[in-house]
Amino acid sequence: MWFKPWKKNNVDVMDRIAMDRLPRHIAIIMDGNGRWAQKRALPRSMGHRAGVESLRKVVKTCSKLGIEVLTVYAFSTENWRRPKDEVGVLMTLLTEYLRNELNELHQNQVVIRTMGKISDLPREAQHELELATERTRDNKGLILNLALNYGGRSEIIEAVKSLGKDVLSGKQRIEEIDEERFSEALFTRGLPDPDLLIRTSGEMRLSNFLLWQLAYTEIEVVKELWPDFGQTALLEAIKVYQKRDRRYGGIHTN
Ligand code: IPE
Ligand code: IPE
Ligand code: MG
């Protein structure tokens, strides 16, 4: 089991985190693996490999903190534009990650979920994903939601199509389509919207990530490249989030 008492060197940061006001759902655009490798004159694949280590650390920290959902952008619909070799490395790393980590994730009650068009991924990756989602389905801890071959626009189009079909077949009354019903037609059905979005490597864009769900999410762009991001950086980001004033379009009356 991942033990709960915080390691001594993090006590400081933990002291300043309000455990009763944690974000329920954290979403991360894990960016900067290529630049991390380039800085070290290494192939991009090494940056991706180092990125897996950051993912392991962040998953563990979220799980120990009691965060409900962690959604990570691992592969976008646009990432197919990369050289075939690089796409291959990313898919292999995904397969390896699931093979190596599944036991530990399962022991720690993590639920593995996916979002995106999984049927277009290589068969091996699909197989590991099936095993992982099946095995962890009834766990009670952190939901680790992997965005794979995911694009926000195509997610919205698919939702529109499925609602349209239900209207045509008489299953859905058009007047009853509201924001809640629409949310249920998205991959994130059943999950709260992200409270906090973190993008590493300083890029200030969404890159087609969770376009509907991020409507009122607090955004933090941090300068660390993804392989340099770990427990301390995550705790720091949560601390910053807790200082934000979420008004949702309203005003404070006191
Ligand atoms: C993020 O790092 C990993 C994926 C997008 C899959 P990048 O590979 O985008 O790294 P940079 O942005 O080129 O540094
Ligand atoms: C976003 O990063 C996608 C993932 C992190 C999986 P990219 O590196 O692909 O985004 P752009 O190209 O900089 O917008
Ligand atoms: Mg990038």
Image (tube, grey):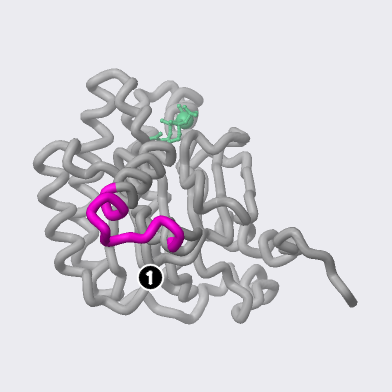
- For image coordinates 18% across by 60% down, the residue present is 132
Q: Secondary structure at mark 1?
A: loop
Question: What segment is highlighted magenta in the picture?
Answer: 165-176
Give coordinates of residue 63: x percent, y percent: 41, 70
Looking at the rendered structure, the kind of residue marked 1 is Leu
Give coordinates of residue 224: x percent, y percent: 58, 41
- Give the class, few, some or many, for how many residues have Cα within 10 Å of label 1's Cα (few <14, many ≥20): many
Position of 47 with respect to 220 (left or right) is left
Q: Is residue 70 visible?
A: no
On whether ligand 2 comes within 8 Å of the CB at mark 1, the answer is no
Give coordinates of residue 159: x percent, y percent: 35, 48
Give coordinates of residue 69: x percent, y percent: 43, 65
- For image coordinates 38% across by 67% down, the residue present is 190
Corner quadrant of residue 216:
bottom right
Q: Quadrant of the C terminus?
A: bottom right
Does 81 appear above or below 15?
above
Q: Is residue 196 visible?
A: yes
The residue identified by callout 1 is: 142
Of residues 202 and 149, the one drawn nearer to the viewer in this rendering: 149
Position of 239 with respect to 144 (left or right) is right
Taking the magenta stretch, the answer to whether it contains residue 171 is yes
Position of 18 with respect to 232 (left or right) is right
Q: Quadrant of the N terminus?
A: bottom left
Of residues 215 and 222, the one drawn nearer to the viewer in this rendering: 215
Q: How many marks?
A: 1
Position of 189 with respect to 85 (left or right) is right
Does 173 appear above or below 205?
below
- For image coordinates 23% across by 20% down, the residue present is 84
